[in-house]
Amino acid sequence: MTDTPTPTDIARDVLTIERDALDLMRDTLPEAFNAVVERLLKVPGRVIVSGMGKSGHVAAKIAATFASTGTPAQYVHPGEASHGDLGMITRQDAVILISNSGETRELADIIAHCARFSIPLVALTKKPDSALARQADHVLTLPDAPEACGIGMAPTTSTTCTMAMGDALAVAMMKLRGFERENFLAFHPGGTLGAQLLKVSAVMHTGEALPTVAPDTPMSETLIEMTAKGFGVAALIEAGRLTGVITDGDLRRNLDSLMSRKAGEVATRNPRTIAPDALLTEALGVMNDNKISALFAVDDTGALRGLVHIHDALRAGVA
């Protein structure tokens, strides 16, 4: 009597089959891969990605990944393309068509459109001798691996490999374009991801909002400045540079003679600071590690440029 597999057993089998297929694709990466990347990098327009059914869902994801990593791209539904959306595909573009079998009838009009206007066509398929592959300028062949569904019909392994190939293309072009964190932030301003890429300069307080005092400022005036600006700290400025900070802790440590002293006598020297172009997450880490709620931002010369408070990180969605 055969034991019935548990859901965990089935899941492990699926993941093993798909992992093996990805290993095979890595070890037998299509020879055309480099040529495809070079071709797409030279495209003056967009990379159009299309497919039908499950391949269409994967195509939409690939287009979105391209677009978010520096390669202008758009998904076009093959059915809609046959009813007017072919106008979205121009001579300035390149097209990637996804079909596991390479015989998807709904792609025919896009293939013909590419041939008519000499638009570069890349086939992403499991069948290198298929109709799609024969019409394409470049063919990226997927590994001949079994689907993970057990009956060999539900797109599972094939869609996983297709998506992975799309990621490989997108990341290769991203790196060759020199696409960096700053570029990524421009395309991801919202949500947690955008917040994690925010720089201190994007949220820091500047100008008249900064609580600043000179070394010879009486502590009575320093307290007024700290209260008025509302950050619980004051920056000690000498010759245009930040040389110290006054915090609530400094006030408590000097309580007995506080009102008879000057700001320079109370301030903590050589304070921790942050660069304006540092990530806000880095500033938050410094504040957490040192149990402080505010951090002054200075430039390479030590000049005060701003102040970031832990509440700024909270509002930005970092903390």
Image (cartoon, helix red, strand yellow):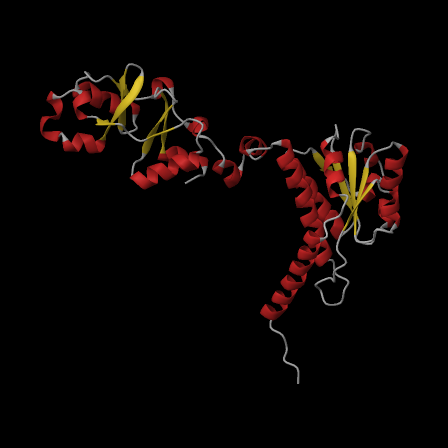
Q: Residue furthest top?
A: 239
Residue shown at 66% from the left, 85% from the top? 1
Where does the image place residue 48, in percent across and percent down from the top left? 76, 37
Q: Quadrant of residue 144?
A: bottom right
In the rendered structure, the answer to whether residue 297 lies left or right of residue 51 reads left
Residue at coordinates 82% horizontally, 44% vertically from top-left? Answer: 79
User: Can you give x and y, in whole percent of width and height, for residue 158 in the image?
Assistant: 73, 56
Rendering coords of residue 7 (x, y %): 60, 69
Question: How many callouts does the rendering have?
Answer: 0
Q: Is residue 189 left or right of residue 114?
A: left
Name the quadrant containing residue 155. Answer: bottom right
Q: Nearer the viewer, residue 317 or 99?
A: 99
Query: In this rendering, would 63 be left or right of 243?
Result: right
In the image, 2: left or right of 278? right
> Is residue 181 in sight in this rendering?
yes
Determine which quarter of the picture holds residue 17. bottom right
**Viewer-closest of 185 and 210:** 185
Query: Which quadrant is home to the C terminus?
Result: top left
Residue that lies at the very extreme toward the bottom in this rendered image: 1
Residue 52: image x %, image y %? Answer: 79, 49
Front in this rendered view, residue 72 or 39 = 39
Instruction: For residue 235, say whether it is visible.
Output: no
Above/below status of 271 relative to 83:
above
